[in-house]
Image: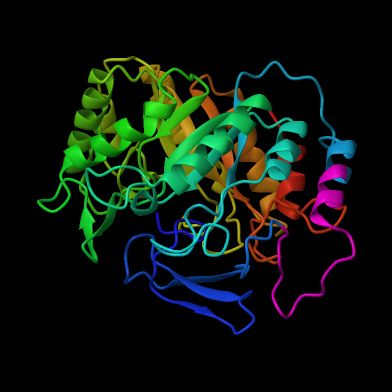
Amino acid sequence: MKKMGGGIAAAGVAIAATGVFAAVSLSGGDAGTPEARVITIPSSASSMPVVSSSTTVPTTTAAQAFTAAIAAGPAGATTSTSKVLPGINISGGEFGGTGGKLGSNYIYPSTAEMRSYAAQGFKLLRVPFRWERLQPDLYGPLSEVDRKALKSVVTQANALGLTVILDMHNYGARQVKGATALVGSGTLATTALTDAWVKIMEDYRSNSNVWIGLMNEPNRQNVTQWWAIAGQVTKDIRAQKISNKLLIPGTAWTGAHNWVSSGNAAQAVKFVDPGKNYAFEVHQYLDAWSTGTTDNCEVKAGQRVNAALTWAEKYKVKLFFGEIAASGQPQCAKEYPDMLRRLKTSSAVLGWTAWGGGAWWAYDYMFRLQSRTTTPTAHMKLLLANMP
């Protein structure tokens, strides 16, 4: 599933002289994908969000907006007995290519962001990171800068009652010696992915409130290849006595809409986790091709999850919706709540994390969750009105 709001491939970043405005070509791991969006990248490590040159800087700060949203509480909220866990993706750790400086080219969630989402009732925090940054060399040690930054995020998030999903946002590949290599290839063996996760989880193996997001949206391995990789890595991780919950994606961008038709479902029924602590991760957007690249929601798009839910209920397995989103377009006000209700009432759904958190998104980004005023964004309004 190609989508706006995934990881940033370093296809081209043009930063203006001010250092605060960047046009970024997205490829989702595929340099040939014609995707592009605008994000704002501060030239310093300032925690305050910045805006594009075409936007008037608000007098209300982000912190004040968060405070107002928290005070207001979920719109129309009522006491719920749903066991579905709601959450947020906070982007930033996957921004800026594969190198760069923390705080200038990429960022991890701030305390203020995490506190605000926890106060609004969210329970999960999906934190994207780049494999190349956290482990610059295959089979090598972790970067101390990024390791410490992620540990700080986890410590603070857990203290706020949030479970953290460490999301390797790499699309089934990574850079090796300046070239893209697919997991499972001769250049990037499956054992390299296992090695990375074993080293990452050394800090969290006793923490059940840290989940392993095995890989974001693999898309170039076929179903047989990918599920062999996922099964082997799972087996090898468990052999290292790592018991944390595993979130296992399918290939074909792990879309819920094509979970059955892509062949992922047929392979998933054969998946074995020796630790018996996993869920299958799927993503779902509501535009014409379920890509998340436009602000449109198609009529009946909220029903796209039905086949995957029916399959999961039949086989009594859990689904985790790692990315969902909608804009303020009128049809989205119908389709997004429809989909959220379906997720809320299905016995197969473990939880979901909405896409669009993070202070570095452009203020006019269609899925943005953090408001720059006292009024929640269109996406956040829909979430708060339809919390499980």
Q: On the rendered image, what quadrant is the C terminus found in?
A: top right
Q: Nearer the viewer, residue 216 or 337?
A: 216
Q: Residue furthest front?
A: 144
Q: Position of residue 146 (x, y in %)?
A: 46, 47
User: Does residue 113 show up?
Assistant: yes
Is 193 located above or below residue 48 in the figure? Answer: above
Residue 270 seen by the camera: no
Q: Most extreme residue toward the bottom, as rendered?
A: 17
The residue located at (82%, 24%) in the rendering is 78
> Of 282 and 368, which appears nearest the observer?
368
**Range of residues picked out in magenta:** 48-67
Task: Tell whether position 266 is magenta.
Answer: no
Instruction: Report the magenta stretch's main SS.
Output: loop
Residue 81 screen position, x and y as percent = 70, 15
Question: Residue drawn 77% across and 32% down?
Answer: 119
Q: Which quadrant would residue 312 be assigned to in this image?
A: top left
Quarter of the view holding residue 346:
top right
In the picture shown, does residue 72 fall above or below 310? below
Image side of residue 183 versus residue 356, left or right: left
Give x and y (percent) for residue 77. 82, 29
Confirm whether the magenta stretch covers residue 65. yes
Q: Quadrant of the N terminus?
A: bottom left
Q: What residue is at 56 percent from the left and 64 percent from the top?
A: 104
Q: Locate residue 241, reporting x and y percent.
A: 30, 16
Looking at the picture, tell me which residue is in the foreground, 122 or 350.
Answer: 122
- Residue closest to the far left: 186
| Residue drawn at x 64%, y 39% as measured from the top left | 338
Q: Nearer the viewer, residue 386 or 127?
A: 127
